[in-house]
Image (spheres, grey):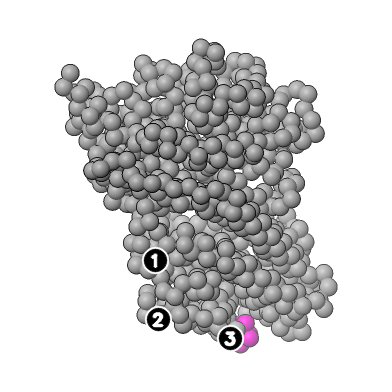
């Protein structure tokens, strides 16, 4: 399962006034302006990353000069921001294009923080000795962590005592909040209580964070208490991606995730007890927010694990059998590998494909949990890929397809207009055209037209009415304009506040393709309006960008698929084909970041495979017949993991989601779809 880490909930207590916030911002702007224009400190990030938490502790130190508190607040935020950058530099962050500049920026921020702090504290102040001790602990913790990450010490030695020492050290500079206020007030009475509460809170937060980010830590070889409990030693870098499903099963199904959250809650209990005698302390809100998130995630993981186990127990066994070809070629070999991986995931209930994200009650969502899980869209994508494989295997996967269709129908909304919601347990989240389009495609491909008419007609009528009223494209969200119920009114309000109504090109293309499969003549009017709109939305380079998906390749693929089916003579087809051919990289892959990745590559191959000819055009140098397909699948072959699947790549952007299952299903589709292009292109070139 994929957990999207929520943003911290902010306490509403003990906030600075608007005047104080403005003065802190003005001081920050003056500091920024004093540096060279070509060497900005980027202090605007302080406003986004670090709220002025020092104000949450002022209940223990009444009577301080507000101007002193403002300067201390900014100084400590500079310290914490510099610390964050330092930690990334030590870890060798691969996404930093200029590490030298980041190092110099750290020094500049430290310089500015010291200038502010020296105005507040004389050299004899106890502040400086405590600061030095915390800085020494931070340094030792970073070095200790690096020794384990570099393999200089075995992970077996990263026991609970050592792990907690690293956590304390790396988060210790947050304790400067209490150190600074006590020194500023000249009052030590409540210092030890606050110091303990801050320390214990950040230990709990780090345990929480390690659970949310365990995949990234594992890929980077960074040890954590959680990983040390499930792994004696990290495997070689090249095989780590293949280990992730195994580790996920251990973490979630052997109780390690729950143990980590219970441990975090224990430290929060200690933090609460430390400040119990201090009345009117805003810091309690910070601790309460983290407690709520830990409890909610613990309970939701329990529910998801139990649901998956129950589903696995209920599923009938299925044997895939032998591959259908005596002599494997590159395309079939990779397709078979992907299919074996997907069938293995089917036996596990597709738990890895689930998306867990935060839908906060504070934003108006009233689900039973703030951390819903969803896999409707993912399961529909998987079923679509299985349809491709079933045609390849002459009906061998019918049992799996019947099961998946049954699951998709069971997830349909039972209230209002029906349809499908991305997170089915959140009634305030409206059904959407993307889920509807993907489910309808599966039902149509599986010959379930009766279900299409029964369950697809009501939400489709809402969308088509929306298109008629607009005289153009329909909304992404399926909400009637008139005769709304109470829940639909809430859905409309939250759509406006959080998501926007659309239309979104990639969503429209996906649903219009389902309508084209259903009957082009029956839906000719809305298809023509939608195709006209998509032609106008095509970028100058020939691609289609997406609102809900990373990079240009998903939007380009689903749009090309639609045009190839419903308007193959459009100039948009040639422009998109040229974009994909032009964007193929020397390694044979495609990617929207610096390197190629298997998901972008699969989507690009699928886009090209939909086009009647991909041998090149006047805008692109001639491409050797079948070369794009051979090279693209060659990249997929080289990037395949040891267990037969491919790595998780960021796919959905709001909220962020990626999955090995999703990457692998697209690789399966791409290998099957692009294989005929080799012979097809040769025959077209020779004709």
The percent coordinates of residue 52 (x first, y second) are 66, 63
The percent coordinates of residue 600 (x first, y second) are 38, 42
Query: Which residue has dot 1 on it?
Result: 92
Label 2 to label 3: alpha-carbon separation: 31 Å
Q: In the image, is residue 123 part of the stretch drawn in magenta?
A: yes
Q: Do the residues labelled 3 and 1 touch (CB within 8 Å)?
A: no
- The answer to whether any part of residue 611 appears in the image is yes
**Left-right relation of 682 to 210:** left
Which numbered circle lies on residue 129? 3
Q: Are marks 2 and 1 in contact (CB under 8 Å)?
A: no
* Callout 2 crowding tier (Cα within 10 Å): few <14, some 14–19, many ≥20: some
At 40% from the left and 70% from the top, the residue drawn is 234
**Left-right relation of 638 to 655:** left
Which numbered circle lies on residue 153? 2
Q: What is the quadrant of residue 387 in the picture?
A: top left
Vertical order, 330 against 101 (above or below): above
- Foreground pick, 11 / 623: 623
Label 3 to label 1: alpha-carbon separation: 30 Å
The span shown in magenta is 122-129
* Callout 3 crowding tier (Cα within 10 Å): few <14, some 14–19, many ≥20: few
Circle nearer the viewer, 2 or 1: 2
At 56% from the left and 36% from the top, the residue drawn is 405
Mark 1 element type: loop
Of marks 2 and 1, which one's residue comes earlier in the chain? 1
Q: What is the quadrant of residue 455 in the picture?
A: top right
**Left-right relation of 587 to 145:** left
Label 2 to label 1: alpha-carbon separation: 19 Å
Of marks 2 and 3, which one's residue comes earlier in the chain? 3
Vertical order, 685 against 178 (above or below): above
């Amino acid at each position: 399962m994929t957990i999207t880490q929520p943003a911290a909930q902010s306490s509403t207590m003990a906030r600075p006034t608007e005047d104080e916030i403005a003065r802190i911002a003005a001081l920050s702007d003056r500091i920024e302006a004093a540096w060279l224009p070509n060497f900005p400190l980027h202090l605007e990030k302080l406003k986004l990353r670090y709220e002025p938490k020092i104000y949450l502790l002022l209940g223990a130190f009444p009577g301080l000069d507000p101007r002193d508190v403002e300067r201390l607040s900014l100084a400590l935020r500079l310290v914490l921001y510099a610390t964050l950058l330092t930690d990334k530099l030590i870890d060798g962050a691969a996404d930093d294009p200029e590490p030298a500049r980041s190092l110099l920026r750290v020094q500049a921020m430290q310089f500015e923080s010291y200038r502010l702090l020296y105005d507040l504290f004389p050299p004899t102040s106890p502040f400086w000795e405590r600061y030095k001790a915390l800085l020494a602990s931070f340094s030792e913790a970073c070095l200790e962590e690096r020794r384990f990450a570099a393999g200089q010490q075995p992970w077996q030695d990263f026991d609970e005592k050592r792990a907690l020492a690293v956590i304390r050290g790396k988060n210790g500079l947050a304790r400067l909040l209490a150190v600074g206020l006590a020194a500023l007030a000249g009052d030590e009475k409540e210092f030890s209580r606050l110091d303990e509460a801050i320390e214990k809170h950040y230990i709990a937060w780090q345990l929480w964070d390690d659970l949310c980010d365990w995949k990234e830590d594992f890929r980077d070889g960074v040890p954590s208490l959680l990983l040390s409990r499930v792994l004696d030693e990290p495997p070689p870098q090249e095989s780590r991606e293949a280990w992730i499903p195994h580790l996920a099963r251990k973490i979630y199904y052997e109780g390690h995730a729950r143990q980590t959250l219970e441990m975090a809650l224990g430290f929060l209990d200690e933090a609460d007890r430390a400040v119990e005698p201090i009345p009117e302390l805003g810091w309690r809100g910070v601790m309460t927010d983290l407690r709520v998130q830990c409890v909610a995630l613990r309970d939701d993981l329990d529910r998801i694990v139990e649901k998956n186990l129950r589903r696995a127990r209920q599923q009938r066994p299925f044997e895939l059998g032998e591959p259908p070809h005596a002599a494997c070629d590159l395309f079939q070999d990779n397709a078979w590998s992907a299919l074996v991986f997907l069938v293995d995931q089917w036996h596990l209930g597709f738990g890895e494909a689930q998306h867990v994200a935060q839908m906060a009650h504070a934003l108006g969502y009233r689900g039973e949990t703030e951390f819903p899980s969803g896999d409707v869209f993912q399961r529909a994508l998987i079923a679509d890929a299985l349809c491709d494989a079933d045609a390849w295997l002459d009906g061998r996967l019918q049992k799996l397809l019947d099961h998946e269709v049954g699951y998709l129908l069971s997830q349909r909304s039972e209230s209002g207009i029906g349809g499908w919601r991305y997170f089915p347990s959140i009634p305030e989240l409206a059904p959407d055209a993307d889920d509807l389009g993907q489910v309808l495609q599966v039902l149509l491909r599986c010959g379930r037209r009766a279900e299409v008419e029964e369950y697809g007609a009501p939400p489709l009528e809402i969308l088509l009415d929306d298109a008629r009223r607009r005289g153009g494209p329909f909304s992404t969200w399926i909400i009637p304009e008139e005769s709304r119920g109470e829940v639909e009114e809430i859905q409309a309000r939250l759509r406006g506040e959080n998501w926007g109504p659309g239309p979104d090109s990639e969503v429209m293309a996906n649903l219009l393709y389902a309508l084209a499969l259903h009957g082009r003549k029956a839906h000719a009017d809305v298809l023509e309006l939608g195709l006209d709109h998509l032609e106008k939305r095509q970028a100058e380079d020939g691609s289609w960008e997406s609102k809900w998906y990373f990079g240009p390749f998903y939007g380009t693929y689903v749009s090309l698929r639609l045009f190839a089916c419903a308007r193959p003579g459009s100039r948009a087809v040639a422009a998109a084909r040229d974009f994909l051919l032009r964007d193929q990289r020397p390694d044979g892959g495609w990617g929207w970041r610096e390197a190629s990745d298997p998901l972008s590559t699969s989507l690009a191959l699928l886009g090209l495979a939909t086009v009647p000819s991909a041998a090149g055009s006047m805008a692109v140098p001639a491409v050797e017949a079948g070369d794009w397909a051979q090279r693209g699948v060659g990249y997929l072959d080289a990037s395949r993991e040891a267990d037969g699947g491919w790595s998780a790549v960021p796919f959905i952007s709001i909220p962020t989601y990626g999955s090995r299952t999703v990457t692998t299903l697209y690789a399966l589709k791409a290998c099957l779809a692009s294989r005929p292009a080799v012979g097809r292109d040769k025959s077209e070139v020779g004709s």
